[in-house]
Image (cartoon, grey):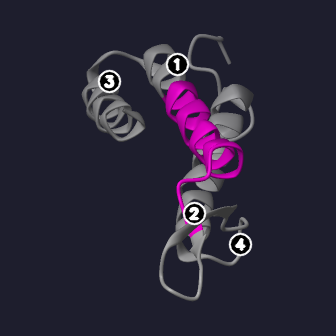
Amino acid sequence: MMAVAKIVLGVLGVASYYRGSETRARIGTAIAVLLVASIYADVAIPLEFELDKRGRVTDVPVPLDLTSLKFLGKMVLVVPLLAALAAHLAEPGLLTKDKSKDQ
């Protein structure tokens, strides 16, 4: 379900190019919340379990590895998005001038 939500929000994010910065900020915030929830779900609801010597699944979850490719991939997606949202909140004034003010 989270994968479908990520795809839908990604499509909305691309389509929001024509809708304005407020809509892009809302969709970006929703995507960031979804990605952070996905990282939390890896910890709270483990889907991978350790195997015993015979190859059977046990009830011991695989601990979260902060160097795993899955976790690092999610962080590569989350950190730039959060930085972009923070820059968006600082606009106008941080990187550009306010176009509505008379200079």
**Which residue occupies the foreground of this view, 82 or 53?**
53
Which of pointers 3 and 4 lies earlier in the amino acid sequence? 3
Q: Residue 47 appears at what percent x and percent y?
A: 53, 54
**C-beta proximity under 8 Å, tags 4 and 1:** no
Residue at point 30% right, 35% down? 4
Alpha carbon separation for disc pair 4 and 1: 31 Å
Q: CA distance from mark 3 to mark 2?
A: 22 Å
Nearer to us: label 4 or label 2: 4
| Mark 4 vs 2: CB contact within 8 A | no
- Look at label 4 and name its amino acid: Asp
Q: Which residue is mark 3?
A: 16
The structure residue drawn at horizontal position 63% and vertical position 35%, both measured from the top left corner, is 85
Query: Which residue position holds label 1?
Result: 26
Look at label 1 and name its amino acid.
Arg
Residue under label 2, please give it: 76
* Dot 3 crowding, Cα within 10 Å, few <14, some 14–19, many 20+: some
Q: Which residues make up the magenta segment?
A: 28-49
Q: Residue at 71%, 72% (x, y): give it.
A: 65
Q: Earlier in the sequence, mark 3 or mark 1?
A: 3
- Residue 65's disc is 4
Q: For residue 99, what is the image quadrant?
A: top right
Q: Is residue 93 magenta?
A: no
